[in-house]
Each structure stands twice: as structure tokens, then as C-alpha cells.
Amino acid sequence: MSDSKKLNVRCPDCDCDLVIDAATGEILSHRPAKRPPAGGASFEDLLAGIDRGKERAEEVFEREKAAMADRDRLLEEKFKEALKRAEEDPDDGPPQRPFDLD
């Protein structure tokens, strides 16, 4: 196969190098674009990102902890209210069975 039947193309989307057979349109080889390690970020930027992630995790944890404490209080109030309603309006016996409705 001669070089005249091959096309060297650079992908505009991912910047990789492709070698394509001109006759069939098949990709003969694919070479990904060279990227700097860690997306080109410096070590200090990566550490700052980790610190921001830790701060966000702490904030979420504190929010959820407060919500759980509030949740216990709300559930206790709902239970007391349901108990009060049950005492005020007692049932008149066992509930009807579906077979009794026929």
C-alpha cells in the first residue's frame, strides 16, 4: 500500500491523529492527542481542589447532621399528634373486612 492511498487527518473534536484509507474510508490507526498529566493543573491547584472538596464535604455533613436532629424532633411531634388524635377519636370496633361488604 503506498502513502498516496492514506489520509492523515487531525480530529477537530479530540485533536487526535487518524490515518484513514482513502479507498475504503476505514481508520487504519488512531493516535490520541498528548495531554499534560492531571489535565495541565499544577500541584498546588490540585491540592487546593482537594481542600475545597473537603470543605464541601464538611458543609454537607454538618447540614445533614442538623437535618437528622431536626428530623427526630419532627417525628416525635408527628407521633404525639397522631396519639392525641387516636385518643380523641377512638375506633368503633374492628375494621370491616372486604368480605363483609358483599
Image (cartoon, rainbow, N blue to C red):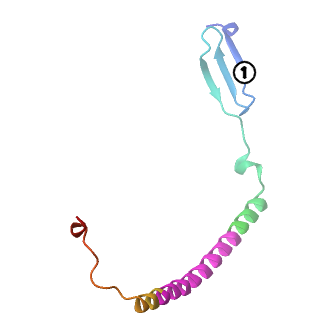
Residue at the location (55% across, 84% down)? 74
Quadrant (top left, top right, bottom left, bottom right) of the C terminus? bottom left
Query: As rendered, which of 61 and 5 lies closer to the eye?
Result: 61
Let me know if residue 57 is in the magenta part.
Answer: yes
Residue at the location (70% across, 26% down)? 17
Query: As rendered, which of 40 and 84 lies closer to the eye?
Result: 84
Secondary structure under the numbered disc 1 in the rendered image: strand
Let me know if residue 80 is in the magenta part.
Answer: yes
Of all residues shown, which one is farthest toward the front?
Answer: 102
Image spot of residue 36 (x, y percent): 74, 45
Q: Quadrant of residue 92?
A: bottom left
Image spot of residue 73 (x, y percent): 55, 87
Image spot of residue 64 (x, y percent): 60, 76
Residue under circle 1?
9
Please provide the residue range marked out in magenta.
54-81
Give amino acid for label 1. Val
Q: In which quarter of the image is residue 16?
A: top right
Residue 64, placed above or below residue 29: below
Residue at the location (48% across, 90% down)? 80
Quadrant (top left, top right, bottom left, bottom right) of the N terminus? top right
Query: As rendered, which of 59 and 3 lies closer to the eye?
Result: 59
